[in-house]
Amino acid sequence: MEILKVPQEGNIIKLEIGMELSDDKKSVVGSVELDIESQSYFVDMVSMIFEEGVEPVNLIVDLKNVTYIDSSGLWALFEGHKKANQKNGKMVLLSPTKDVRRVLDITKMSSKLQVFEEESAAIVSFNLS
């Protein structure tokens, strides 16, 4: 699993999750699972971002390459959400696959974390809070 940290306008950071970095190292490609084997890497990355000291940080977690998520992956997302709130920031999810969206809805995680299909809408949501 690779996570690419992409600074956006203002205090927004987009995390792109995928199997590997693209040849130009500007994006991630390939399907990946957010599960017991990969959740600690995600949590470590999110923790590192919030420990850098810049406040508040708003995170967009791009899930377009995540094809499967289990309970430990859900826990990792919720931990990111909690860390964002503790640092006066916000974390939102972007473009989950159909299967991941279904798990988010069934577990009611989509009622705790905002989910967007368009990056522009996710960015606007930070300005509204």
Image (tube, rainbow, N blue to C red):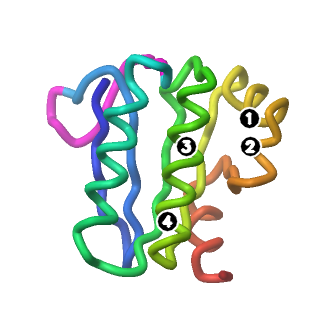
Name the residue tied to disc 4. Answer: 84
Q: Is label 4 in contact with label 3 (beta carbons under 8 Å)?
A: no
Name the residue tied to disc 2. Answer: 109
Q: Amino acid at mark 4?
A: Ala
Q: Is label 2 in contact with label 3 (beta carbons under 8 Å)?
A: yes
Q: Amino acid at mark 2?
A: Met
The front one of 103 and 64 is: 103
Q: Amino acid at mark 1?
A: Leu
Q: CA distance from mark 1 to mark 3?
A: 10 Å
Q: Is label 2 in contact with label 1 (beta carbons under 8 Å)?
A: yes
Name the residue tied to disc 3. Answer: 77
Q: List x then y, in percent, for residue 94.
A: 58, 47
Q: Main secondary structure of the magenta part?
A: loop
Q: Is residue 108 left or right of residue 46?
A: right
Q: Amino acid at mark 3?
A: Leu
Tell me the element at label 1: helix
Q: List x then y, in percent, for residue 73.
A: 54, 29
Give residue 112's quadrant in the image: bottom right
Which quadrant is the C terminus positioned in? bottom right
Q: CA distance from mark 2 to mark 3?
A: 9 Å
Of the numbered discs 1 and 3, the one sitting upstream in the chain is 3
The disc at residue 73 is none
Vertical relation: 9 (above or below) 41: below
Q: Residue at x 42, y 79 (%)?
A: 56
Q: Is label 4 in contact with label 2 (beta carbons under 8 Å)?
A: no
Of the numbered discs 1 and 4, the one sitting upstream in the chain is 4
Q: Residue at x 52, y 25 (%)?
A: 66
Name the residue tied to disc 1. Answer: 104
The front one of 79 and 65 is: 79
Determine crowd level at label 2: few under 14, some 14-19, many 20+ residues with C-alpha closer than 10 A. Answer: some
Q: Which residues are magenta?
A: 23-33
Q: Residue at x 16, y 37 (%)?
A: 25
